[in-house]
């Protein structure tokens, strides 16, 4: 008898190896199994968005979609590798051919394979950030500008301006006017530089990181053939962290998904906090308008935080107008209420946080399970000193410790010379900040200063260094001018006045021309002035800020400290903390003018982003959340200032937190007392 054997198409396979309904909660299951067509997934903090994306990819593969027909875009290589690994672990097979990576990684693959219509060879070069800076310097030389002049912005600063212009899809002139008003006089230079930079990249057949996105979009817009290939190939497109995309990335995904229209984007508008990187919240807020038949899903079950923490975070973010309303629900117990901690000043704030951290550690919480978060790095200065005094090791996430930052060490170098005129390291650092003075001439000048016995009055005299070459002499004149003012009797033993003098005599301008985040660094230095005001003498101030360096992780010794080296306490800006979680979180500096940032109060749009930043900070906490604010602070312009609590605290219902008041005992250990201890 003739028999016919029928092979079942993989596309018709109905048996799944994964029990999706059992593995996922109802909201996640709906996304995984039904999110065809344009789909917006609003994934609240701690709601398992990565799990949902991974299971969605696994589900598509089990349905018979070929790996090469799926495009999964993430924002970090780590996230991409983790998702691919988890998909393969679920299916117990390699997902060979799956397009999974960052926007830039995917762009690189596409341009090498299909970039010919744009004149790109498959072996085009990619400029990393250092290469890009070097090329910008070369372009400046070709424009006959002196790259070594202190009067011009540094190449890295110029690179930052040009990059923001590309990603925001605005002209250089617009970007300078909006974000860099101190560069208005340089606008013609930036415009010429941008034109020359583009020409030179083309000449050497290279793209920088920004070009990868620009050329990807240009390719699918301008080449009908390539657009057809790619839009046909990618049956399903998935994007993680959509609230962090910029205009170019949004347009790329909208174009590349136009054939099959299966574009699933996952994100949380309440965590959109990167406008300073040209990310725009409009991409996620306007997604339903851009795709009229868009399905919207909400992941509102939180697996991270106790419900008392979520209740506070939910109440705070509801104050924003521009948002998709959500109400996160915890899968955990009620837990301890967040604490709003009122302290006298910055020193008491630091003492409370340090002591509470030690107490939690004694109760069994590992140091690495605790984090202190802040709006700006300067807010942690007092805390870093307090942690150093107590011998607690800590790690500053995504950066360096406050007193180890370049701009802080630059200014302190001037003060160190006044305190010890034979401090060679400080001399070399301060001298090389001057226009026209390199390391060679700095060394020669110091040798002469050494021969003069470090007599600053003599060194600041008109004849000292008069035989130096003209360009070196000019820079040294600025150096002497600063020190002439520093060693005046009324300033000499007042570190706050000395720092102000350094800023006023050229260093503020140096900051603006040499650092990409100049405004933040200037704010750090203004706060350093305020911090230094409490010291009665220069030497005690320098002793304190130098003392902390003795507690750096690599110099700690002894068995008792070994555990801390392996699992240090985390200090972090809130921006750097996004996506992370800890058992105990301290959010410090919640005072008017500090958080939210004072400049945000004039713009509702900026204030709402600041509130999203507060929401991100609160939702990092699993078990304990402490919100600290000081009642007083010193301001160099206004003197002693009474602080109002942050608007983010004032707008909370009092039932959402416990109020805590801090007292100081004579022996200087900190205690904290709830307002109603009998309750």
Image (tube, rainbow, N blue to C red):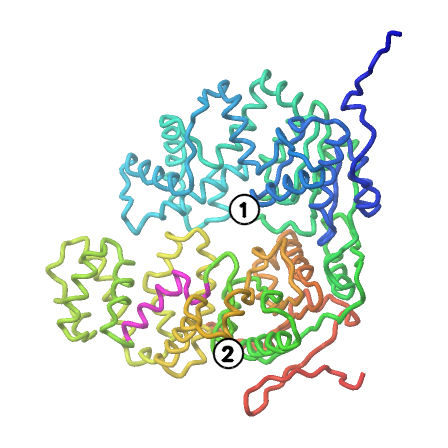
**What's the distance in space between the residues labelled 1 and 2, CA to CA?**
37 Å
Where residue 674 sits, quadrant-wise, is bottom right
Q: Secondary structure at mark 2?
A: loop
Q: From the image, tell me which residue sits under label 1.
A: 277
Spot occupied by residue 404 in the image (x, y as percentages of width and height): 41, 64
Q: From the image, tell me which residue sits under label 2.
A: 390
Residue drawn at x 36%, y 26% is: 203
Of the pair 407 and 25, the residue shown nearer to us:
25
In this view, 354 is above or below 332: below
Judged from this view, the residue extending furthest toward the front is 1
Spot occupied by residue 593 in the image (x, y as percentages of width and height): 58, 66
Q: Is residue 207 left or right of residue 275?
A: left
Spot occupied by residue 264 in the image (x, y as percentages of width and height): 72, 36
Which residues fall within the magenta stretch? 401-418
Q: Is residue 147 left or right of residue 569?
A: left
Spot occupied by residue 539 in the image (x, y as percentages of width and height): 34, 80
Q: Earlier in the sequence, mark 1 or mark 2?
A: 1
User: Residue 596: which disc?
Assistant: none
In this view, 570 is above or below 105: below
Of the pair 587 and 489, the residue shown nearer to us:
587
Residue drawn at x 33%, y 47% is: 152
| Residues packed near mark 1 inside 10 Å, few (<14), some (14 to 19) or many (20 plus) | some
The image quadrant where one finds the C terminus is: bottom right
In this view, 325 is above or below 377: above
Judged from this view, the residue extending furthest toward the top is 2
């Amino acid at each position: 008898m003739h028999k016919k054997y029928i092979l079942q198409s993989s596309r018709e396979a109905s048996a799944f190896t994964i029990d999706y309904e059992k593995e996922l909660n109802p909201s996640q299951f709906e996304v995984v199994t039904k999110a065809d067509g344009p789909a917006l997934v609003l994934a609240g903090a701690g709601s398992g968005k990565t799990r949902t994306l991974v299971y969605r990819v696994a589900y598509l593969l089990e349905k018979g979609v070929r790996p090469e027909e799926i495009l999964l875009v993430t924002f970090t290589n780590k996230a991409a590798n983790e998702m691919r690994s988890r998909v393969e672990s679920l299916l117990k097979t390699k997902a060979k051919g799956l397009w999974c990576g960052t926007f830039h990684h995917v762009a690189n693959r596409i341009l090498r394979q299909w970039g010919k219509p744009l004149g790109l060879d498959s072996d085009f070069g990619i400029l990393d950030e250092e290469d890009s800076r070097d090329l910008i310097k070369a372009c400046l030389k070709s424009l006959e500008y002196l790259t070594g002049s202190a009067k011009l912005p540094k190449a890295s600063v110029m690179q930052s301006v040009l990059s923001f212009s590309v990603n925001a899809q605005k002209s250089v002139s617009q970007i300078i006017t909006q974000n860099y008003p101190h560069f208005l006089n340089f606008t013609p230079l930036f415009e010429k530089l941008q034109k020359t930079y583009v020409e030179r990249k083309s000449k050497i057949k290279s793209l920088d990181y920004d070009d990868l996105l620009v050329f990807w979009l240009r390719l699918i817009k301008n080449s009908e053939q390539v657009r057809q290939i790619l839009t046909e190939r990618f049956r399903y497109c998935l994007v993680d962290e959509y609230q962090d995309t910029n205009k170019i990335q949004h347009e790329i995904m909208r174009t590349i998904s136009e054939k099959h229209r299966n574009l699933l984007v996952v994100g949380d508008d309440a965590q959109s906090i990167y406008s300073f990187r040209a990310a725009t919240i409009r991409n996620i807020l306007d997604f339903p308008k851009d795709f009229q038949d868009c399905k919207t899903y909400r992941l509102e079950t939180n697996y991270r935080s106790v419900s008392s923490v979520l209740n506070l975070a939910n109440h705070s973010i509801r104050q924003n107008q521009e948002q998709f309303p959500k109400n996160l629900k915890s899968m955990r117990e009620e837990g301890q209420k967040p604490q709003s901690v009122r302290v006298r000043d910055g020193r008491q704030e630091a003492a409370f946080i340090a002591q509470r951290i030690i107490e939690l550690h004694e109760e069994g919480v590992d140091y690495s399970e605790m984090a202190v978060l802040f709006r700006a790095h300067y807010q942690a200065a007092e805390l870093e000193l307090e942690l150093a005094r107590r011998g607690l090791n800590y790690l500053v996430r995504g950066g360096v410790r406050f007193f180890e930052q370049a701009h802080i060490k630059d200014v302190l170098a001037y003060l160190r010379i006044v305190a010890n005129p034979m401090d060679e390291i400080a001399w070399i650092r301060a001298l090389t900040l001057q226009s026209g003075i390199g390391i060679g001439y700095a060394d020669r000048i110091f040798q002469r200063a050494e021969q003069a016995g470090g007599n600053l009055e003599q060194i600041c005299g008109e004849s000292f260094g008069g035989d130096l070459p003209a360009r070196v002499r000019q820079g040294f004149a600025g150096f002497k001018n600063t020190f002439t003012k520093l060693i005046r009797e009324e300033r000499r033993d007042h570190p706050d006045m000395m720092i102000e003098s350094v800023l006023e005599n050229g260093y503020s301008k140096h900051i603006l021309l040499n650092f990409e985040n100049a405004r933040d660094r200037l704010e750090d230095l203004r706060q350093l002035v305020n911090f230094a005001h409490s010291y009665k003498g220069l030497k005690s101030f320098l002793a304190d800020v130098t003392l902390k360096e003795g507690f750096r992780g690599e110099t700690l010794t002894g068995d008792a400290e070994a555990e801390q080296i392996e699992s240090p306490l985390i200090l972090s800006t809130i921006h750097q903390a996004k996506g992370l979680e800890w058992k105990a979180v301290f959010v410090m500096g919640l005072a008017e003018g500090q958080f939210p940032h004072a400049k945000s109060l004039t713009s509702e749009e900026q204030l709402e982003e600041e509130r999203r930043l507060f929401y991100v900070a609160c939702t990092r906490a699993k078990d304990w959340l402490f919100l600290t604010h000081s009642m007083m602070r010193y301001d160099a312009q206004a003197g002693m200032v009474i602080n109002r609590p942050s608007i983010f605290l004032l707008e909370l219902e009092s039932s959402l937190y416990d109020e805590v008041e801090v007292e100081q005992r004579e022996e200087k250990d900190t205690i904290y007392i709830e307002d109603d201890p009998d309750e």
